[in-house]
Amino acid sequence: MSGTILKVSGPLVVASGMSDANVADIVRVGEQRLVGEILNMTGDRASIQVYEETSGIGPGAKVEPMGLPLSVELGPGMLENIYDGIQRPLPEMKAISGDTISRGMDVPALNREKLWDFVPVAGIGDKVVAGDVLGTVQETSAISHKIMVPKGVSGEVVKIEQGEHVVSDVIAVVKDEKGTEHELTMIQRWPVRIPRPYSQKFTPSRPMNSGQRIIDTLFPIAKGGTAAVPGPFGSGKTVVQHQLAKWSDVDIVVYIGCGERGNEMTDVLMEFPELKDPRNGEPLMKRTVLIANTSDMPVAAREASIYTGITIAEYFRDMGYDVAVLADSTSRWAEALREMSGRLEEMPGEEGYPAYLASRIAQFYERAGVVECLGSDHRKGSVTAIGAVSPPGGDLSEPVAQATMRIVKVFWSLDSSLAYARHFPAINWLNSYSLYVDTLAPWYNEQFGEKYMENRTQTMRILQIEEELQEIVRLVGVDALSHDERLLLETAKSIREDFLMQNAFMDEDAYSSYAKQFRLLDCILNYDNLGREALEKGADMNKLFKIPVREKLGYAKLADPEKFEEEYDIINEEMKAQIAAVLEGGSEND
């Protein structure tokens, strides 16, 4: 039974005669059959957010309920693809309609013509439950796609088809206890606003290596953790997100371009096929799903894109993979919520955002975590959620930033003054924090001994004291400081310039392994420790600051990662010898 449109207000459509429909159901609006979703119901009237441009639609047009909630298709073919906010494949839509995509297009999310080689893991007669792996498909050279038993199905495998199939072919038949046979294809459908189920959730205990030294050493994020990247315009939020997408040691990356500029998504599309994964040498696109709902695309679909991305991530998590979801940016998503809330004439909260803003943000980040997946093999997977926040004017007291900070456990605060000084990543080490440091400490101690965490603590202390000393220097000059304090300023400068700064355009510096980070920081702190001992013995401070090895230390981060251990030993030996030579030369007062 179809309804009739009473009112159109931008992306909001109000229709009557919808008594058979339910909240969150998908509908088709008008002659062009535009996709929409029911937001609320009052009697037989439905308020619908339409995911496409509504110009040309007026009162009297028909609305057809589809009887299903907004869902995504999950199966082989998602990797290397680029979708819009409601999981329509943009490359296939372009092939049909050209550069200007026409409204009302209905293209399946998964290609129905491509053949996939299905290799069974289960056999006829096997007992299976929801989450068990029936077989695998080599989706890309980097990722093996596991075809799982969907939720609600269990029983005995009575048929399984090896060989090449399209995703809609029946590849297995499972007979349940009642004797009902369930025909299974490679496709699963799942409502995007409902989290996918799992057996058990765990506290994250392993770090995610992003290759960015300030993140991994000072403010680490755990696999299965949550993080926010707030900052004003031009401070490098998108650059940080791109670096995380490129180099993080996760199996799958889901990158959501939510309301940001189209040229930034273009950069991802152009770069990722060219870049190689440092772990396996494969192109990064082989493990990436892109969701593009840029600033010039429909605002309602922007709201759905976040849920589409996290649901795809949960599906790969259920296979036992580590997945990172990068949302750029959640502020634009919140603005889409605010626009729809205003058109629905709901009571506004702070700064016009809906009163339920904080709970919606919490619902998104709560879907991250390390879990034991459904199935009898007890495999583990994780979803790490990282969202960029774009507060107007860099004001972190605004509602989206505040609501996000209450939920996430890692806060990488971007600073425009660092960005303008060409210090990248422009993460302010005094305003940022990570609440995972204590839970990850056992992993660091196991891999590198207690020295790793001791170096981190010492580095944070030096950077904090440096800020206090800079106030004195600005007032009365550097000559007012003691020798020890001046050495601390030199060490802090070396930490900032030789360790925290990275150049994304240099292959050797764009990505740093944990081992390289540990040794590089250890060299810098070794200079501080040896220098302090030398000053106590009366060494010439000015000569100590000018020893030749300091220049070598500055270039050390550009050394070949494979040869860095050798470089580390050479630098430390030269440092000891040169500081000893300064001591032999006598004090500056001789």
Image: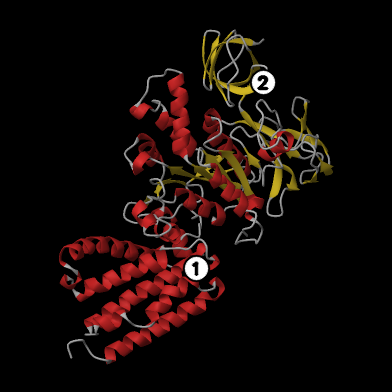
Q: Which residue is mark 2?
A: 33
In which quadrant is the N terminus drawn? Answer: top right
| Quadrant of residue 247 within the rendered picture | bottom right
Q: Residue at x 36, y 67 (%)?
A: 495
Q: Earlier in the sequence, mark 1 or mark 2?
A: 2
| Quadrant of residue 581 within the rendered picture | bottom left
Residue closest to the eye, 337 or 146: 337
Is residue 334 rendered to the left or right of residue 492? right
Residue 162 seen: no
Residue 545's x, y, as percent?
A: 30, 79
Pointer 1 local density, CA inside 10 Å: few below 14, some 14–19, many at least 20? some
| Quadrant of residue 316 within the rendered picture | top right
Residue 224's x, y, as percent?
A: 51, 47
Residue 560's x, y, as percent?
A: 54, 73
Q: So how many labels did they put on this image?
A: 2
In which quadrant is the C terminus drawn? Answer: bottom left
Is residue 486 rendered to the left or right of residue 254? left
Residue closest to the eye, 262 or 577: 262
Which element is circle 1 on? helix
Pointer 2 local density, CA inside 10 Å: few below 14, some 14–19, many at least 20? some
Is residue 178 rendered to the left or right of residue 38? right
Q: Is residue 363 above or below residue 242?
A: above
Residue 13 seen: yes
Which element is circle 2 on? loop
Label 1 vs label 2: CA separation?
A: 56 Å
> Mark 2 is on which residue type?
Arg
Q: Residue at x 56, y 55 (%)?
A: 246
Residue 576's x, y, as percent?
A: 36, 84
> Mark 1 is on which residue type?
Ala
Q: Which residue is mark 1?
A: 515
Q: Is residue 417 above or below residue 496?
A: above
